[in-house]
Amino acid sequence: MTGMIKESNLFNGYLPNVENSSDNPEILLENSRSKPNLFCINHDLPPLKTPIAVRANKLLSQFQKTYNLTVLTATKNPHLPEGIKINYAKSLYPKALIELLKKFKLEKLITLLIWPDADIFWFIPALLKGYQLIKQEKPAAIFVMMMPYSAGLVGIFLKWLTGLPLVLSLDDSLTCTTMHSASPSWLHYYLETWLEDFYIRQADGVVYVSQFNLEAVKKRQPPQHQSKLHLIRCGADPLDFAIPINQKNQQELAQKFEIIYTGGMSGWYNFYHRPEERTLAKRLYRYWLEFGYYRRATIDYSSSSPVFVGRAIKQVISQRPDWDKQIKLSVYGNSFPEFVVQRVLENENITDVVSVTGTLPHFQAIQLARGADLLLITLANRPDGSKGGIISCKTYEYLMTDCPILAAVPQGENWDYLLDKPGVWLVEPTDTKAISEVIQEIASAKFSGHTMKFDRSHFLPELSYINLAQKYLKIFTQVCSQSTVN
């Protein structure tokens, strides 16, 4: 089959040669003195396993080659490369009060009053600590990685206080209809739109990870602010994929077909309650929680679950009984309670074909993905036919492998981005017939001794954090050259 390769050749000639000068303290000191300072606000850092924390770690590791970094975070005991100055500011989050309100079923009050997100309680400590650090370190610019969105307010206030140029990495748009299909009220919708526009007009540069979202927001901006918007997609680190994966029992593997999904899913509760449990009281409570919401788009989160793929596997096995107990979907990185997961699998009768594992280190997730027979991406469906602007972060990591990819995603940026990529099968998220056909095609190839592998080496430069970081550095250079602060 055209484009099929062995993964061992995937990174040949691409990985950079890294010279280690850490044994010479004098060289390190001289390099440090010659580099400008950059002040970074990263609320989430490792050991947190969120995509934002992983991405921050990768980018800061690259920025460190050009800048001396001072990082402000809300993450306790963060893990970053040696040489980066890390400073912790504790949030004033009123945990006891919030827990009390939840105990009395007053979640709606929390949703209405806490804005733009729960991390707004970090604002004052971060602002005070950040101003002190800037006075000490005298950085050339301020860089803020969102989410949370409230971290952007810290950056703007620090810019007002110091006059330093500000770059915001906005990640998912506040008005992205996939991430934020509904707002607690029309007022919240108005404020979210206003806040995003406010960020763009106050910052010197704003980075988006989605072309679709960038263009939608750009249309709202006056001409003088449109040039501030930059597209820098998420990516992956080639070094994470160059280390040999653990060899399993090859004879055993030849008789199994494993579909792997790495990361969290959000559609569990759509299948949690049985029909007889949907009482009038529960329906009224649900109605109360959703009352007054302003909806931007109709999103079906049920497809962000293993249910439809599990059903598809059942269909395949019904057509090929000889494959019984040989095909399985493994979900790694689940953060939902085990009792919820187990009940959904039992309700849908897919316990025998779906296994779910909790969160695990990012590198371990990559190692597992590299050994998959088929990699799965599944996003929330859009029954109204509208297009979404989100791309799952795992998209880029999956493309770093040579494995087949089943992308059960709605029309939109993720679909368009994967459309011309080798070894990718695109299907609608809830189309179990189409999903089963893809599984049967790829499983048939493996069981007949022709495991599918695909050459994606020409995409590696586009996906690598090494090159993505260079795009950020160009923005830093541009905004600093235009700054009037000495």
Image: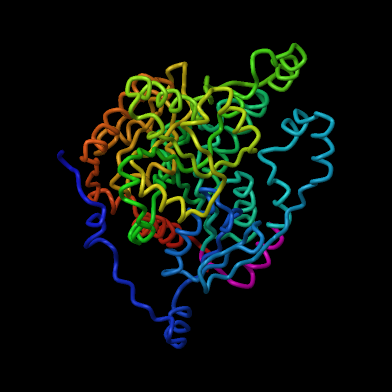
What residue span does the magenta drawing correspond to? 127-140
Residue 415 is left or right of residue 201, and the answer is left
Residue for point 25% across, 57% down = 8
**Type of colouring:** rainbow
Magenta stretch holds residue 49: no
**Quadrant location of residue 97?**
top right
Q: 270 and 209: which one is in front?
A: 270
Q: Where is residue 220? Give x, y as percent.
A: 48, 31
Q: Where is residue 92? Give x, y as percent.
A: 77, 52
Q: Where is residue 64? Give x, y as percent.
A: 46, 68
Q: Main secondary structure of the magenta part?
A: helix
**Quadrant location of residue 436?**
top left
Residue 452 is left or right of residue 91, and the answer is left
Residue for point 60% across, 51% down = 156
Q: Where is residue 206? Give x, y as percent.
A: 47, 47
In this rendering, the answer to whether 59 lies above or below 203 is below
Quadrant (top left/top right/bottom left/bottom right) for the N terminus:
top left
Magenta stretch holds residue 131: yes
**How many labels sit on residues?**
0
In this rendering, the answer to whether 51 lies above or below 288 is below
Q: 80 and 157: which one is in front?
A: 80
Q: 118 and 104: which one is in front?
A: 104
Residue 301 is left or right of residue 291, and the answer is left
Toward the left, the furthest residue is: 2
Q: 133 and 8: which one is in front?
A: 8
Residue for point 73% across, 13% down = 279
Residue for point 46% across, 54% down = 364
